[in-house]
Image (cartoon, rainbow, N blue to C red):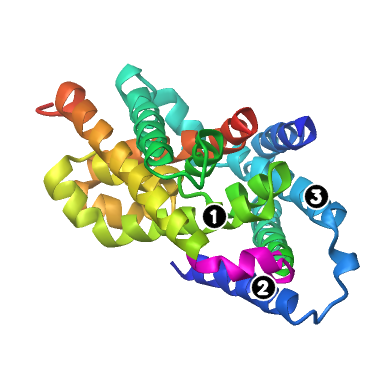
Amino acid sequence: MIIVLSLMSLGIIIGWIFHSRKKFLKLTGYLTNWAIYLLLFLLGISVGANEKIIANFDKIGFQAISLTLFAVGGSILFSWAVYHIFFRKK
Amino acid sequence: MKGSLIILAFFVAGVITGIYRFLPGQIFQTDYSLYALYLLMFLVGIGIGSNKKALTLIKEVNFKILLVPLSVITGTYIGVSVFSLVQSNLNLPDSLAVGSGFGYYSLSSVLITELSNETLGVIALLSNITREIITLLLTPVFARYFGKLAPIASGGATAMDTTLPVITKYIGSDYAIISVFSGVVLTILVPFLIEIIL
């Protein structure tokens, strides 16, 4: 997985060098969207073919949503404290 | 919102294709999605590197603004750790990895699928889409009762783009820079944090 992070870092450098080339950036934006579509389509296929996931989809969905409520709740409460200590009444 | 619907549509199309075996399964073994992931990470890097907002923001960094993404990470991890204690299906590392998406559902779900398994990848997808939807719907409530940073915290990585309009509408455009900064930092950190945790 080092490859993934190196590729991203390489991308950041290239993006920084070519940040004023509008056509180039439009193309990468377009390709990014299609790479995401492709990957999620592929993820969907392996999910659909996985009987264990399909049979438990309601359970998985419930886990996902309850985890999110905790994640959002925790971050809101913590940022609320940070806001009151450091940001309020500027 | 439109973007997430399109992505969800591709995912659902894939699920249907998978259930009814419209395509031979062997074609879609992990290698293909791994190369697609390599391409995506490279492209995401270009997007970050060429982001002019990110470049100008670096000049405005001070101690206080750094606290925002830090508190989003800390708060999310505290909440998710509590979650892993109150139920027994997901253990702490898995829960933390899903939480580390900070709403960046496309990248987190794909990375977690590669590093762990498909079930956790699906949880990451649904969880992080939910995070974006909650932020879009509840930002007025969060801003009213939990201070101006709350919508930024809830938005996580999406606070730089998809949820930015609604956030600035309710907390004021003077906080827009903080929102974008927090979103940019979290977006960059998502792959690193997931990598460290899994």
* Quadrant showing the C terminus of chain B: top right
Q: Mark 1 touching mark 3, by CB under 8 A?
A: no
Q: Label 2 is found on which chain of the structure?
A: B
Image point 67% across, 56% down: which residue?
A: A32
Answer yes or no: are tags 1 and 3 on the same subunit.
yes
Q: Which of the 4 quarters of the picture holds residue A80? A: top left
Numbered disc 1: secondary structure: helix
Q: CA distance from mark 2 to mark 1?
A: 14 Å
User: Residue B138 vs residue A88: left or right?
Assistant: right
Is residue B176 visible in the rendered structure shown here? no
**Local crowd at mark 1 within 10 Å, few (<14), some, or many (≥20)?**
many
Quarter of image, res A90: top left
Q: Which residue is mark 2?
A: B15
At 23% across and 26% down in the image, what residue appears? A82
- Residue span colored magenta: A47-58
Picture coordinates of residue B21, whole percent (x, y)? 80, 79
Relative to A38, say whether B15 is above or below: below
Q: Earlier in the sequence, mark 2 or mark 1?
A: 2
Q: Quadrant of the N terminus of chain B?
A: bottom left
Q: Which residue is mark 1?
A: B123
